[in-house]
Image (tube, grey):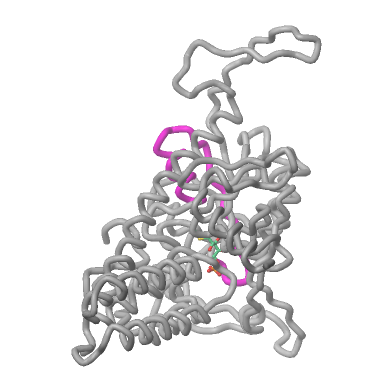
Amino acid sequence: MDGLQAVRYTRGRLLVLDQLRLPHEYEYDEVQTSEEAFDAIRSMRVRGAPAIAIVATLALAVELVNQDFSSATVVSQQDYINQKLDYLKGSRPTAVDLTNAISLLKQVIAHAGQSSNEAATVREAYIKAAEKILQDDLTTNLAIGRYGAEYLRRQQSPFDIVDEVGCFTTSSSGEQIALEKDDRKMSVLTHCNTGALATSGHGTALGIIRTLHNMDYLEHAFCTETRPYNQGSRLTAFELVYENIPATLITDSMAGALFAQRKEEKNISAVIVGADRVARNGDTANKIGTYGLAVLANYHGIKFIVAAPTTSIDLETASGKDIQIEFRARHELTQISGAVVEVDGMVNTSKKARVAIAEQKIDVWNPAFDVTPYRLIDAIITEKGEVVRSKTGTFDFQAIMPERWTAQVEKEAHERI
Ligand SMILES: CSC[C@@H](O)[C@@H](O)C(=O)COP(=O)(O)O
């Protein structure tokens, strides 16, 4: 097996790792149509905001390569693509990466149709733009990893990380105080899965952890189990073990005790999570349990960091209260699936079962995501750098995404007329 990859793509062929079978089996399914991609996303065989966008948009690219569109006109080809994109958008509602990708792709094909009267030009423009989304995601993740690691390092020791000389700060009485350099390695906690399996590679929050490890700044990574779907224990634990990153799994309910009992000993410096949708003020929707971790981190004086590509930022949504949260099936809480482990620890994947772990008639409340208010977030790390809270207290994304910001302001001004 090469590096972990949620998708394997060559033009005309898309393979998607079935994440429901991890960590017991590592198998790819071929996805040939938009309908198959919709099903893979809805059933969570592929999940994670960037990976959802990548699979949905590339599946349509595969369809455009392999199906016969020889009689299509520019307009019928554009209609076909727009309808499929609208359909794919309904696969899962909370993550915004797919919505942002769809807006971009619709613009691309509209533009292609203006400059040519060949349907093939529209198809080619779509395919190239969808492939670029895949390529750009990896570059984005590597940048997030670097910015995040450097940000955390600066929080611990406010020196330029290559500066050996030291620096000073000014006390309230105007006195210059030498700051001590703190070279301790740091430990962090992460939630859900935001790694190579949720993206095109490297990952966002888990990408920062990977980069901290590669830079030799990481002492230890803690990952939560992430009930009810166990993306932490099934996927993040799998990635951490695969990468030989020193790591420990905890249940979600152990985070408070971990911070209270082991913060000093392990130098636990940050909770780092991903995002499904960041509203314009910085409120962040992410896997259920994120909000609780933010409250705990704030109580314990631990930095709370969101790692999010700009494709996860939704300028159209003013605050978290406007974010649609997905609710999922009751059996995700009341049953669990896995493989049988023999006494010697060998996993027998031929013996798989869904096991009831709760009274089957109990009422269930199962939101897949929660919203962390911006006040609890110290920094949002994007591929354009870190964003910290502005003087008004909210996050201001204008500097890192000026074009999208201006377009949104103009759109709102137009709507007011
Ligand atoms: C880089 S992935 C960011 C988020 O999508 C991730 O933290 C998350 O909440 C995933 O939820 P999931 O329900 O597994 O799709």
Q: Nearer the viewer, residue 272 or 116?
A: 116
Based on the picture, tell me whether residue 216 belongs to the magenta stretch: yes
Q: Report the label total.
A: 0
Q: Give x and y (percent) for residue 156.
A: 60, 28
Left or right of 116, for residue 233: right
Q: Is residue 70 above or below residue 58?
A: below
Q: Residue furthest top?
A: 175
Q: Residue furthest front?
A: 417
Q: Residue at x 41, y 81 (%)?
A: 82
Based on the picture, tell me whether residue 398 belongs to the magenta stretch: no
Q: Is residue 154 above or below residue 293?
A: above
Q: Residue at x 28, y 67 (%)?
A: 8
Q: Quadrant of the C terminus?
A: bottom right
Q: Which of the 4 image quadrants contains residue 1?
A: bottom left
Q: Residue furthest bottom?
A: 71
Is residue 350 among what the camera can see?
A: yes
Q: Residue furthest right?
A: 173
Q: Is residue 40 above or below residue 284?
A: below
Q: Residue at x 23, y 79 (%)?
A: 117
Q: Give x and y (percent) for residue 202.
A: 39, 52
Q: Which of the 4 image quadrants contains residue 259?
A: top right
Left or right of 246, for residue 256: right
Left or right of 365, for residue 382: left
Is residue 344 among what the camera can see?
A: no
Q: Nearer the viewer, residue 56 or 26?
A: 56
Q: Give x and y (percent) for residue 114.
A: 31, 73
Q: Which residues are magenta?
A: 205-230
Q: Give x and y (percent) for residue 80.
A: 36, 86
Rendering quadrant holding ligand 1:
bottom right
Q: Residue at x 56, y 67 (%)?
A: 230
